[in-house]
Image (spheres, helix red, strand yellow):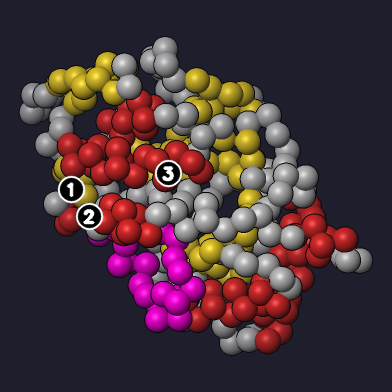
Amino acid sequence: MPATIKGSITVDGQELAITNPDKPLWPEAGITKKIYLQKLAALSPFLLRYCRDRLLTVIRYPHGVSGMSFYQKNAPHPLPEFVKTAVHENITYIMLQGLPELIWLGNLAALEFHPSLHYAGSVLPCEWMIDLDPSLEIEPRIMEAASIVGEVLRSLGLQSVPKTSGATGVQIIVPIRQGITFDELRKIGHLVGRFVTEKRPDLFTLERLKKHRGDKIYFDYLQHYAGKTLAAPYTPRARPLATVSTPLLWEEVERNVSPADYTLLNIEERLNVMGDLIAKLPPQPVENIVANLP
């Protein structure tokens, strides 16, 4: 077996062990662990905003994206003293509060970050997300579907931000004020989902079982709920090109951009120019729709 190479770095006053910095994590993209940790540090002001104070699930790839992987919900042992945890339904979750925790997880080859949709200790959603999940591995209509959903939301008086999942899908994010419940958002989601599936039955489906969807795009309003997760904005994804879940402008959706366009190798330049598109959108008047639900 090759010898393990070890070193350490100090991040915000915390000394962190770094092992095998030259290990390829995304071989096709030429990204080693060292490069990955550098990119995580650049992403941290954006990624941490949507992970902090939430229950974190990560997906670890000890041998890079071409090797085996596993979901990690329970915090591993031993745990550094600076890493905080929160218990929810008998699971001890990591709290991703700052850059030291992020680099520590990156060194463990955590390549994807999936936070809860609510804060630890709360039962209320942080935002509203609709997940558009293609049935096909390559879906050229995904931006068309996102555009239709965005148009329907605008007709309801709601502005939103589309983001690539970093894999094949798109999520539509609507910032909300605290106080709206998951069940209320599910009711609105069902309303919008029924409308788009009736308007475009060739494109959308509400069928949860993938084997029954054919080639249609699943309008998933059910995944947004307490105890569930979705890929965080700005999380890397364990795909060959090292794609990143990236918020988009609606003009980019109309241009039919590809989720594969946004990767660890170019996301930093984009964020330096565009900033955080989600944070720029104020909370939307979802409560006005809730008040008129049957």
Mark pair 3, 1: CA separation: 19 Å
Question: Quick check: marks 2 and 1 in contact, CB under 8 Å?
Answer: yes
The span picked out in magenta is 240-263
Q: Which residue is mark 1?
A: 31
Say what secondary structure mark 2 lies in: loop
Residue visible at 47% across and 24% down?
A: 75
Q: Amino acid at mark 3?
A: Leu
The residue carrying mark 3 is 47
Residue 206 horizontal side relative to residue 112, left or right: right
Q: Position of residue 13 (x, y in %)?
A: 31, 16
Above or below, 250 relative to 31: below
Give the mark nearer the N terminus: 3 vs 1: 1
Q: Earlier in the sequence, mark 2 or mark 3?
A: 3
Please state if 34 lies on the left or on the right of 256 as rendered: left
Where disc 3 sits, the SS reads: helix
Out of 21 and 9, give the one closest to the viewer: 9
Alpha carbon separation for disc pair 2 and 3: 16 Å
Q: Amino acid at mark 2?
A: Leu
Residue at 56% from the left image edge and 46% from the top image edge: 229
| Residue ID at (38%, 59%) | 274
Disc marking residue 265? 2
**Front position among marks 3 and 1:** 3
Residue lying furthest top in this view? 81
The quarter of the displayed image where residue 103 is located:
top left
Residue 144, disc = none
